[in-house]
Amino acid sequence: MSLRAGLTIMLPGTLIFLLGVYDDLHPVGVRVKFAVQALAALMLFAGGLRIVDLPLIFGSRQLSWVVGVPLTVGWVIGITNAFNLIDGLDGLAAGSALFSTFVLFVVSLLNHSSAVALMSLVLAGAILGFLRFNFNPATIFLGDCGSLFIGFMLSALALQGTQKAPTAIAVAIPIVSFGLPILETLLSIIRRFISGRPVFTADREHIHHKLLQLGFSHKQVVITLYGVSALFALLSLFLLAPNGSTMGLVFAVLGTGVWVGVQHLGYLEFGELRRIALRTIDQRQVMINNMAVRRAIEELKATHDYRTLGNILSAAFGSNDFEVFELRLNQGVALLPAGSLQVVSSAEEPPYFRWTKPGSRFRHGGISAWSLQLELITSEQHAAGSMVLQRLYHERELQLDINLLTTDFPVVLGDALLRIAKSHAAVPSRIEQAAVMAATAG
């Protein structure tokens, strides 16, 4: 190994190590960390360790330095902090790094890169000796100086290895071999973004924390994640013979494994993403139901009799997931025939309208339903009555924008009821009296 090759990596590596030591003694902010790491990455770039192409995106075209600099800096900062991020349990970060280092060593031997092979071997030996005392129960710990240094060294050795490797191998193998820390970093960023928290805030929802919550012991979690790291390392070695079918199979296996694993970890944020995805699939039906309500709002504005009103409401709710609605008018308002609406009367309460969807399994008084009550306040702030919508509980979400029912719809329906009431003798005064009494009582 030439002196120049060693200094190109070790000088910025020493800078990262000193940053970690200082951070362990006197914690520094994220901006300072990133600034120093970016400086170390620029030192690598200036020494010739850089990302010069991305064949999966840009084909065989060489990238200019304008593109290469941010890609190189992003790669170094990302991998450096990824290994720092998984350093949450004794032995986890060091053990995961050991598998990645082994992959770099094998690839460098096959590509006749003696510098990378030697440095990978030295780094693997140091990690292995350290891991003997870092495994649970640990007597020594990585700290930021250790985890940041290991992450930086691996990112730099991966860049060094690209100098002699075929382009597809140079890009794909490091990404796959660093799979666990990269996955942890991406999950953390996505989780915090979805939940509206700052991306760089600490939390206890990392993969190892989730496994602990599932009942795994400390050692079981670490050994399980060693297995995950070993699987990533093994799959990355399959890419040494890069052809379309091999690469496709590797990424298909990885994608399936990651998806299944994340689902079993029980992240609330990804449950929300799943809900949105299902909502997107059902969006056409949501639009159909929304349009039915919007159409009803427009038609109610010109309604002057109960029969037309009943037919409009039946059409509006016949296509969505509500099973029943009850329309209760202010006391003293006469209920006349209203198309498909049934007049319900009893000795205990005033008569009211009820509609039940044809073929519905809804049972009145059953406990497997939820209800939404809308107070029908007219545009002149008169209380016209109320509407109660009921729906059976089931896994599928309501395929309707509930805001449509809680904004314009109650006002327009209240205006229609008041307008119909005024068309019948003696009804207006009673409604207005009820409104005045309600206002006085308030």
Image: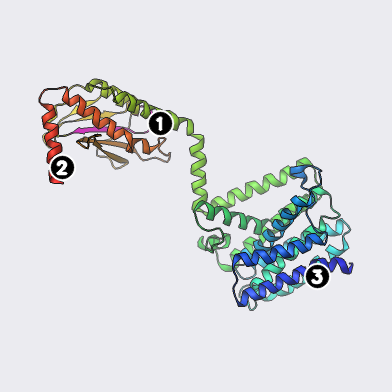
Q: Is residue 210 above or below residue 263?
A: below
Res. 307 in view: yes
> Which amino acid type corresponds to the residue marked 3 in the rendered image?
Val
Q: Which residue is mark 3?
A: 122
Q: Helix, strand or loop at disc 1?
A: helix
The secondary element bearing badge 2 is classed as helix
Residue 20 lies in quadrant: bottom right
- The residue pinned by badge 2 equals 439
Q: Mark 1–mark 2 contact, CB under 8 Å?
A: no
Mark 3–mark 1 distance (CA, rounded to whole Å): 65 Å
Q: Which of the marked residues, 3 or 1, is nearer the chain's N terminus?
A: 3
Report how many numbered discs are placed on residues in the image.
3
Percent of width and height locating residue 430: 11, 31
User: Mark 2 or mark 3, which is nearer to you?
Assistant: 2
- Which of 311/207 is in front? 311
Q: Earlier in the sequence, mark 1 or mark 2?
A: 1
Which residue: 28% across, 34% down?
Answer: 411
List the residue tagged with mark 1: 290
Using the numbered discs, state the Cα–Cα distance from disc 2 to disc 3 in whole angstroms. 84 Å
Residue 338 seen in the figure: no
Residue 232 drawn in magenta: no
- For the point 57% across and 59% down, the residue is 207
Q: Over which residues does the magenta segment extend?
A: 317-329
Identity, as a three-letter code, of the amino acid under mark 1:
Asn
